[in-house]
């Protein structure tokens, strides 16, 4: 069976449409590659900022820990002084009662 002119024209039309579809797919793939590249860049920037933030937070946490230890030590010193002052107050009161 020999192909007719109509069959050949239909096949040519299908071939042309397949080429157009392939071109559109190539264009879409190029756009998707650009978007993927942009997305990867953004993710890398976010990861870098997250790492920098974690380092800053860790540094500040260490500083807060140091400040808490200093406050603890000051409170202990204050407590020791308060006990001494209370002791002196008791002793002065006793001396005043004896002399007074």
Image (spheres, rainbow, N blue to C red):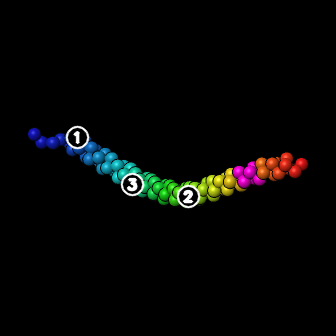
Q: Secondary structure at mark 3?
A: helix
**Which residues, given as a range, are shown in magenta?**
83-88
Q: Along the line of sight, which residue is nearer the eye, 26 or 74?
A: 74
Q: Secondary structure at mark 1?
A: helix
Residue at horizontal 77%, vertical 53%? 88
Residue contact at pointers 2 and 1, CB within 8 angstroms: no
**Residue 35 image point, x, y percent:** 43, 53
- Residue found farthest to the left: 1
Q: Which residue is mark 2?
A: 62
Main SS of residues in magenta: helix
Q: Decide if residue 97 is in sight here.
A: yes
**Residue 68 image point, x, y percent:** 61, 54
Mark-to-mark CA distance, 1 and 3:
40 Å
Q: Which mark is residue 80?
A: none
Residue at horizontal 40%, vertical 51%? 32
Residue at horizontal 74%, vertical 51%? 87
- Residue found farthest to the front: 98
């Amino acid at each position: 069976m020999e192909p007719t002119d109509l069959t050949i024209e239909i096949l040519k039309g299908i071939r042309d449409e397949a080429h157009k579809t392939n071109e559109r797919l190539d264009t879409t793939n190029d756009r998707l590659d650009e978007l993927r590249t942009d997305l990867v860049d953004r993710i890398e920037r976010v990861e870098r900022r997250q790492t920098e933030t974690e380092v800053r937070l860790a540094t500040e946490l260490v500083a807060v820990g140091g400040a808490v230890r200093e406050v603890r030590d000051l409170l202990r010193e204050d407590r020791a002084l308060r006990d001494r002052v209370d002791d002196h107050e008791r002793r002065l009161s006793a001396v005043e009662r004896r002399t007074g």
